[in-house]
DNA sequence: AAGGTGGACAACCGCGGCTGA
DNA sequence: CTCAGCCGCGGTTGTCCACCT
């Protein structure tokens, strides 16, 4: 299957979004929603490809996005979810309201990976350290499962 | 004070699944 | 049943900024 490149090199813009572009996208989606990402930029008058618009909206402009630092609790949830789901960032994001897969992925690659490594190093240093599964207590697991149990994909 | 380095985050690329014709 | 197009996802890259030497 041969696929046309996303931004068919038709003079479409790439790179960082300007506040003006953001505003155009927000206004358009407020008015008409985002039925068809591919058609959206044309209709909204944006020189971007649909993919780029979608990404910008999902990761940055959506009104329900919780911006700012991750709490320790959120980080723990991410670590546990990652243990179970692996690199299924969107699945993890679905369980953390207001957080995006991109954001979670970034956080993972920047500090959680290091934090985990540190924890495991500490575990390994302990003599007779029983390495169960690098997971935490059963109550934690229980709590976590209740979180995992309800995916919320409805957009 | 200037240059180097690493962290944080936004954005892009390409693949694969899903769906409708 | 097959094919083409769209969407979503995960991996990766680029850029900016803060901190360190």
Image: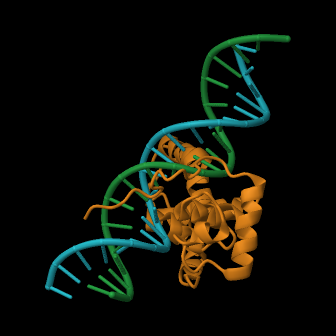
Chain colours: A orange, B green, C cyan
Q: Seen in the image, is A85 located left or right of residue A154? A: left
Residue A112 in the image: x percent, y percent?
Answer: 59, 50
**Vertical placement of B16 versus A9: above or below?**
below
Quadrant in the rendering for residue A33: bottom right
**Vertical placement of A121 versus A63: above or below?**
above
The quarter of the rendered structure image containing the C terminus of chain A is: bottom right
Q: Residue at x 59, y 67 (%)?
A: A42
Q: Seen in the image, is C20 located left or right of residue B21? A: right
Residue A86 in the image: x percent, y percent?
Answer: 44, 62
Query: Is residue A100 among the parts visible in the rendering?
Result: no
Q: How many marks?
A: 0
Residue A128 in the image: x percent, y percent?
Answer: 45, 48
Query: Is residue A86 among the parts visible in the rendering?
Result: yes
The answer to which of A44 and A51 lies nearer the viewer is A44
Quadrant in the rendering for residue A101: bottom right
Residue A40 in the image: x percent, y percent?
Answer: 59, 71
The quarter of the rendered structure image containing the N terminus of chain A is: bottom left
The answer to which of A49 and A99 lies nearer the viewer is A49
Q: Residue at x 63, y 67 (%)?
A: A58
Q: Seen in the image, is C16 located left or right of residue A102? A: right
Q: Residue at x 48, y 57 (%)?
A: A134
**Vertical placement of A139 versus B12: above or below?**
below
């Amino acid at each position: 299957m041969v696929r046309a490149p996303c931004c068919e090199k038709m003079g479409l813009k790439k790179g960082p979004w300007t506040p003006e572009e953001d505003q155009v996208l927000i206004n358009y989606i407020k008015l008409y929603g985002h039925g068809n990402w591919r058609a959206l930029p044309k209709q909204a008058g944006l020189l971007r490809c649909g993919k780029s618009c979608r990404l910008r909206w999902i990761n940055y402009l959506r009104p329900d996005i919780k911006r700012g630092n991750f709490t320790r609790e959120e980080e723990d949830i991410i670590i546990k979810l990652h243990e179970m789901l692996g690199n299924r960032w969107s699945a993890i994001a679905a369980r953390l309201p207001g957080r995006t897969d991109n954001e979670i992925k970034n956080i993972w690659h920047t500090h959680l990976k290091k934090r985990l490594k540190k924890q495991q190093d500490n575990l390994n240093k302990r003599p007779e350290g029983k390495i169960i599964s690098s997971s935490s207590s059963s109550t934690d697991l229980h709590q976590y499962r209740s979180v995992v149990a309800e995916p919320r994909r409805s957009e």
